[in-house]
Amino acid sequence: MTQDIYLTGITTTGTPHIGNYVGAIRPGIEASKDSSKKNFYFLADYHALAKAEDPDRIHRSTLEIAAAWMALGLDTNNAIFYRQSDIHEIPHLTWILTSMTAKGQMNRAHSYKAAVQDNEDSGSKDPDQGIMMALYAYPILMAADILMFKSTRVPVGKDQKQHVEMTRDIAQRFNHHYGDILVLPEAVINGNTAVLSGLDGRKMSKSYNNTIPLFADEKPLRKLIMKIKTNSLEPGEPKETEGSTLYEIYKAFATDSEVLDIEKRYADGIAWGEMKQVLFEYINDHIKPAREEYKRLIGDPKVVEQELQRGALRAREISVPFLQEIQHAIGIRKLG
Ligand code: TRP
């Protein structure tokens, strides 16, 4: 049985939020401490382009997300930590995989279908209006990320599961044509916490503008938590934990016994205001030490850059020869 290789990326379109932390960063850091595992964590900056963000935002986000991983204690001697765009073999592989991807399959991607649906809902004559090829081909770039490092396990939120399945299909078609070269990955979905709800109760996501930044200072953090949507039940009235965003976020941070205790307080009718205060204090205490280090790194981007360069060197020790092997297999070879 060969060793599993874990790989996951975060798109650099915004400030790291507690959904990123709970879904990708925290489990990644945990795993990075296990020296028997060889894992890959990266900043998906080319994916950011699909969301048509502005250059300054992508640049800033890259620094912030990298600094977050580092401040929270990613073991970068063990895990390989890099920026997607530094691995020049990834866009090469993307093009190769593009030639092995059925257009019909991309038509079925949830994110593309959602964009078409939006156009139809708004009565547009052209269902593809305003949709860029980067959005359409997004799953192929993601397949290249995954296949480049022969990863077997890809921790992602539920919304990304389809992309990992598409990666398998693409790899299968490639292997069928060219021989057994690519390794088929599997998505790892942490059902409990991988998709956290945001301020308005929808999935916490940059696209919904409902996130809680991981390193918000105490005051803004408190203010945001006070804004989390609840219902109109009065203090003293028993409350359901199910469907409560406050509970869900608390659960993502707290230990099992602390969660049991909170469940009891819900049943006893804890006031929403009090629950908000409990949640604020919990997250604040949890994050405080890393927040200081995060600020230091944001003020010293060279340190972050160095770390990414070091990670790119290590990643390319793998991607350079593997791309050569792939190119050889498809007939892109030296002539003599
Ligand atoms: N598409 C992922 C997201 O937006 C980010 C991502 C890009 C990724 N490449 C990846 C995740 C490869 C896992 C593996 O959440």
Image: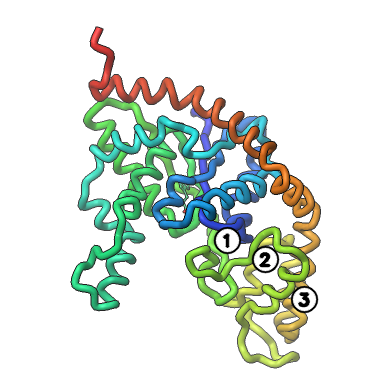
Q: Secondary structure at mark 1?
A: loop
Using the numbered discs, state the Cα–Cα distance from disc 3 to disc 1 in whole angstroms: 23 Å
Pointers 2 and 3 in contact (CB under 8 A)? no
Mark 2 Cα-neighbour bin, 10 Å: few <14, some 14–19, many ≥20:
some
Q: Residue at x 48, y 41 (%)?
A: 153
Pointers 2 and 1 in contact (CB under 8 A)? yes
Q: Which residue is mark 1?
A: 192
- Image-quadrant location for residue 256: bottom right
Mark 1 CB near ligand 1 (8 Å cut): no
- State the residue in front, 73 or 269: 73
N-term mark: 2 or 1? 1
- State the residue in front, 314 or 238: 314
Residue 6 horizontal/vertical position (percent): 53, 39
Mark 3 Cα-neighbour bin, 10 Å: few <14, some 14–19, many ≥20:
some
Amino acid found under the numbered disc labelled 1: Asn
Q: Nearer the viewer, mark 2 or mark 3?
A: 3
Q: Which residue is mark 2?
A: 251
User: Where 42 falls versus 38 (above or below)?
Assistant: below
Q: Which residue is mark 3?
A: 277
Amino acid found under the numbered disc labelled 2: Lys
Quarter of the picture holding the C terminus = top left
N-term mark: 2 or 3? 2
Q: Residue at x 61, y 80 (%)?
A: 229
